[in-house]
Image: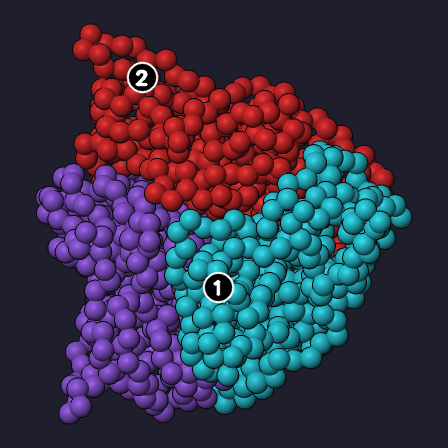
Chain colours: A cyan, B purple, C red
């Protein structure tokens, strides 16, 4: 995620001591942001207190600057509420904001003579626009974050050629899939890493309905949070009463690295709304590709949790908030039975809503 | 939450360099505390180690000062164990400690001519005593944290007038409730924010049994962790075998902002015990109004988990530890079948038990 | 957990200002490590950016040094990928690495005249080897982390004599067990703490099948994360279709304190593999003795979740990733139906896989 710009802190040449103090403050603010902790929890000054009225003007400025959408709040007191409301309204009403690039599009296979579906994935550095004006250094499959979605049917023979154009070695793991051990994609456990400039061909059969993801299993802390992940759908997972959803939505939740707090590679206001018609059934699968749990809360309409990790649940249950931990998937059915524009977000507010308005893991379901 | 006092660090005029070093240490300690991380995990000195015997006297002093009940431990080594035990016993046995103010009391409605139940909520800054001697700057509904509990019946028409006496705009969201879209209370998504000095009237019907909460949906990172939340009960949620609980308890769990680690706005030793008689059924609903998951562990007697987010579970299950994530509610039935004073706490020890004894998310169930 | 060594930062006498800057950086890196946050999320310099190509050589060196297995990554760019791969392969292929000491061994009871099974636990400081070359100051029961496993049968009368040879008082709690209130082991709630040099005798009956743990309930933030925990098994918990597992495995997950990110007191590559034969049923119980949630992901073979906190689930469900929160236990059945060496790890990559290869909460299931 982008660090807080610290222009305000270095505007004029400071004294030697002051410089360290400022750097210290800047680092603390930046660090709080990196940890997705509200900035106002960090001290405004070395001897500061945490009272909401104590936020210094300096950290306040940093917290609401346009360049730090991830930061928390605390700046309200330092800013006229009208200005705060205007900036918030401007940001919130810019949704859905256009950005360059869209991740997670279906990847077309080549069908070989024996029926095998062959896909190509190229891992390479790319510039990726997270939200308007915020472009980061990503490592991506086929130039998008998330990488393309691989959709196959139960019984398909699958071949995936992975080309590594990264400056580092890599490997690709098919999370939750039944694959031969030497196709499991874990560097130094089931295969040698794929060096820069080389490729590796994975082959496996799609044995059962599944919704899951593929991702790097080499230096996962950096490579996955840099964008090296994408979804896999095998057939359709069973639904109660054989409900046929009017649309199927995948939400790949990231929270760290250069990609930061994003749904399908974009953060609010560049996240994509879910548009449905009154009476529709919408099937949503959350895929946590990040490093923290995210309790996903949808306003206005209930979520019926029908599958975990692609496996149908024996006892589906209702919820308005569905926590999803790293590596997990939850599939929910939503009956679009109430018209309106409904907020849809991670309920950890430091991941979705602060003094600048909405950010990060926030989108909307619009039922008309 | 209150930051660690750093008196020990600035007792004598330091050299210029030493000052920065001290400020650095103070900030790190403060930051660790703000993040609810055991202070002893933070380095005692730049080249320090994490061994428990390495805690410097300086950070040790900070960690066990009365002004930092949230801090972890690590100071034992720097303190005689007898002194440590005495301070711990004094603190732990002061439970339940009296404080000014009690949150979550039932709010009486005015019944209008057409039967509508009208409630009034005023959001305003207030001083709030978290535990004896620790008073914070809260933003609260009707002067208490949590705000008053709204109790209505299924079928009731409900009207809630919200007056904003904060220095910032706000809005109120009825989490998990079926309300008209323009009554959903999300700033800049379903309504304009309520500016300081203005009011907004929410109207909705109570359509089904529910246990949930209302909260600000404007700058949620700050406003909710400053105290702008309260509970809603609609009728009684169904229980297995139609068990009639002898008492119904709501536990609103907070962990951040000025309110910090609290159950119903108070931290141990000012949390309220649950008193039951042998053979009673006690129904408890956890409501996570904070920013972190809290696994709630009750000693001595089992928890039967019967509902999630107010929806009865199709397959209730037993547990001794129930993790609750932000926005979630879990309802459990406890059969008080063992006499005694049973510890009841978040099992993340940095949220409940350290060198100073119990703190934060800790209370007791007393069965007689 | 061990802090990052910062040799690289102090190699040559720096200018006064530079020294503070370096200390600052060292502390930030150390702090990020203590929080199990990828180091490369922390700024490489006060005005740095989070791009993966921006990691300075300095923090890069720290991040991949052999002395900081817990650190994240970000250093790849600063290191030749071939060197990185070599170091990674060397580390990953050293699994399972030999270390001194093994925790969790069965503790033999003395059977008294009336049939009571008497156990002895001595809490004392000890040196404990976490992984090759990393020895920490632990506080342990009977000299190992975890302490020995207590195995009894339903109906057994149990007596446990606890000797305290720590420099601090302590107490022992039997988590989730049905015990008399004065045997529950919570300092200053159900008993006076056990002072250094003294002992306390706990007596209780084993009333039902259970898989759980015992641990200090005195300064839990420090004492439990220093190693004062162990497992308890009472009989066998019921399995669906009366499946008889070929082996039963307990995985005690720690993440903080001196013990740090470990499975049964060891971190990769010193964790113990699970060896099974094709067609075996393996029963695994995760016991979270730490301070964070860990989603445990097993490659290649499914997990059937059959019990929570030792209580059989009414509706067992399949998963490939099982999140376990502090204090919780989940019991899963694994059918070893695919040959190979399968990765088995916490899916929070900052807890298991980084630039240096695997670390912390990572092990392997080897099916032959």
Whole-percent x, y for residue C163 in the image: 32, 21
Residue, far right: A197
Determine which quarter of the picture holds residue B169.
Answer: bottom left
Q: Is residue B308 above or below residue A193?
A: below
* Residue placed furthest toward the top: C113
Label disc, if present, on residue C119 of the rendered structure:
2
Q: Chain of mark 1?
A: A
Q: How many marks?
A: 2
Marks 1 and 2, how far apart at CA: 57 Å
Task: Give the farthest residue toward the front.
Answer: A114
Q: Which residue does the image show at 35% across and 76% down from the upper left?
A: B178
User: Percent from the top left, x then y, of residue B33?
Assistant: 46, 54
Residue at image location 14% in from the left, 56% down from the top: B244
Whether tag 1 and tag 2 are in contact, CB under 8 A, the answer is no
The foreground one among B172 and A153 is: A153
Q: Quadrant of residue C85?
A: top right
Disc 1 designates what residue?
A: A243
Residue at x 22% of width, y 74% of height: B154
Q: Quarter holding the N terminus of chain A?
A: bottom right
């Amino acid at each position: 995620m982008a660090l807080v710009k610290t222009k305000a802190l270095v505007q004029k040449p400071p004294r030697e001591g002051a410089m360290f103090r400022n750097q210290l403050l800047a680092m603390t603010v930046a660090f709080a942001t990196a940890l997705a902790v509200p900035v106002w929890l960090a001290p405004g000054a070395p001897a500061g207190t945490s009272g909401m009225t104590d936020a210094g003007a300096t950290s306040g400025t940093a917290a609401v600057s346009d360049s730090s959408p991830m930061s928390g709040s605390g700046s309200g007191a330092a800013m006229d509420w009208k200005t705060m409301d205007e900036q918030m309204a401007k940001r919130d009403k810019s949704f859905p904001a256009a950005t360059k690039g869209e991740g997670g599009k279906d990847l077309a296979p080549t069908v070989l003579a024996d029926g095998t579906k062959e896909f190509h994935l190229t891992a390479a550095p790319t510039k990726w626009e997270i939200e308007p004006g915020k472009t980061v250094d990503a490592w991506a499959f086929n130039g998008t974050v998330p990488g393309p979605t691989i959709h196959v049917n139960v019984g398909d023979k699958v071949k995936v050629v992975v080309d590594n154009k990264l400056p580092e070695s890599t490997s690709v793991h098919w999370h939750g899939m039944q694959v031969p051990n030497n196709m499991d994609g874990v560097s130094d456990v089931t295969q040698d890493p794929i060096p820069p400039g080389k490729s590796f061909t994975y082959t496996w059969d799609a044995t059962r309905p599944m919704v899951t993801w593929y991702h790097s299993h080499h230096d996962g802390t950096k490579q996955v949070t840099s964008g090296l992940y994408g979804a896999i759908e095998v057939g359709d997972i069973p639904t109660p009463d054989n409900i046929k959803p009017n649309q199927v939505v995948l939400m790949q939740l990231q929270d760290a690295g250069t990609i930061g707090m994003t749904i399908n590679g974009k953060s609010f206001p560049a996240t994509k709304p879910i548009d449905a018609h009154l009476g529709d059934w919408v099937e949503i699968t959350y895929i946590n590709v990040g490093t923290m749990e995210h309790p996903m809360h949808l306003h206005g309409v209930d979520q019926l949790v029908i599958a975990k990790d692609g496996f149908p649940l024996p006892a589906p249950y209702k919820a308005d908030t569905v926590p999803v931990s790293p590596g997990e998937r939850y599939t929910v059915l939503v009956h679009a039975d109430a018209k309106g524009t409904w907020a849809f977000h991670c309920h950890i507010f430091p991941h979705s809503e602060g003094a600048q308005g909405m950010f990060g893991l926030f989108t909307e379901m619009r039922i008309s």
